[in-house]
Amino acid sequence: MAHPEGLTMLHGLILNGRVAGFFRRKRRGAMSTKKALLLAILSAALIFASMAAALDYKYVASKRSDKYHYPHCEWAKKIKAENLVTFKTAKEARAAGYVPCKVCNPPSED
């Protein structure tokens, strides 16, 4: 089920599309019961961490770029989970050295 701002529903939880894809791929690759159990524990921990982070930010950026975006921006959706940086305010993003994306046009100041 698709959700606004590039989020995806997975097991009743709303996640960033890339994170959800990661869990789907890992879940398909589990071969043994022991491996599946370890994966389920790891997935649950990562899901809860992702949910806590997802509820606490308004802008996203990549460690490999100098732009910050709204989470629903077409370029934000391409950020790999391991490179994702989140910000609560535009001022916080600017202080970290990021500039607004020219596609989704987030504000320079909140």
Image: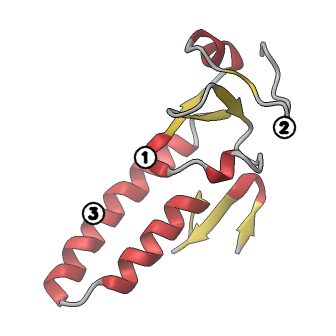
* Location of mark 1 (residue): 82
> Where residue 16 sits in the image (x, y, percent)?
59, 56
Q: Mark 1: which secondary structure? A: helix
Q: Mark 2: which secondary structure? A: loop
Q: Earlier in the sequence, mark 3 or mark 1?
A: 3
**Numbered circle sitting on residue 42:** 3
Q: How many marks?
A: 3
Q: Amino acid at mark 1?
A: Glu
Q: Is 58 above or below relative to 5?
A: above
Which quadrant is the N terminus positioned in?
A: bottom right
Q: Between marks 3 and 2, how big is the CA–CA gap?
A: 34 Å
Callouts 3 and 2 close, C-beta under 8 Å = no
Q: Amino acid at mark 2?
A: Cys
Is the residue marked by circle 3 packed among few (<14), some (14-19), or many (20+) residues within 10 Å? few
Q: Between marks 1 and 2, how big is the CA–CA gap?
A: 22 Å
Q: Nearer the viewer, residue 71 or 80?
A: 80
* Location of mark 2 (residue): 104
Q: Earlier in the sequence, mark 1 or mark 2?
A: 1
